[in-house]
Amino acid sequence: MGVTSRKGDTTINAMSLRHVKALSLVVSFLVTLMIARAAAAEGDLRLVEAARNRNVQQIRALLGQRVDVNVRSHDGATALLWAAHWNDVEAADLLVRAGADANIANDFLVTPLSLACTSRNAAAPCQPRPTAWVKRSRQTTRRPNGAALTTTP
């Protein structure tokens, strides 16, 4: 026999009921997040598809219809990310002039700007890579071989 609460529930039943309520709150929160993500993913993906298919005429037509230039596909890719992937300077120029954000990362944390900088395209809007990099957590500037140049507090 267990100890009973004022309501007549045993201790185990009262604890189980609290766990079930907490679990149902967590599940409802996760379902809400999933629904919100699905609703966002149901946006007009024609622009992303046009960029993925390298169709500049369709990109131009869709931009004329004022579609969302920063809409993201199921993996977070944007039309500008696809233009950068294909090194399509004309499409990228159209998208940027229409307001596309070059810093929106996909689900793999790749941005159009980083993709353009790492490609071999001569028209990429990046400076040459620096010879030293800064490790922000310790504020230590290092050479590519790992030797510390300076350390700041």
Image (cartoon, grey):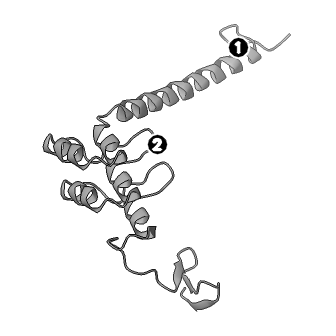
Percent coordinates x, y for residue 57 in the rendering: 21, 46
Closer-to-camera residue (57/142):
57
Amino acid type at circle 2 is Asp
Q: Quadrant of residue 84?
A: bottom left
Seen in the image, is 135 located left or right of residue 64?
right
User: Mark 2 sits on what residue?
Assistant: 75
Amino acid type at circle 1 is Ser
Circle 1 SS class? loop
Q: Please tell me the numbered disc located at residue 5.
A: 1
Quadrant position of the C terminus in the picture: bottom right
Percent coordinates x, y for residue 41 in the rendering: 38, 34
- Tell which residue pokes out farthest to the top in this image: 8
Comes first in the chain, label 2 or label 1: 1
For label 2, count other residues whose C-alpha is less than 10 Å away and answer few (under 14), some (14-19) or many (20+): few
Percent coordinates x, y for residue 110 in the rendering: 46, 57
Closer-to-camera residue (84/71):
84
- Tell which residue pokes out farthest to the right in this image: 1
Seen in the image, is 89 located left or right of residue 5?
left
Q: Where is 8 relative to 129, above or below?
A: above
Quadrant position of the N terminus in the picture: top right
- Tell which residue pokes out farthest to the left in this image: 64
Residue at x-position 49% and y-position 26%: 31
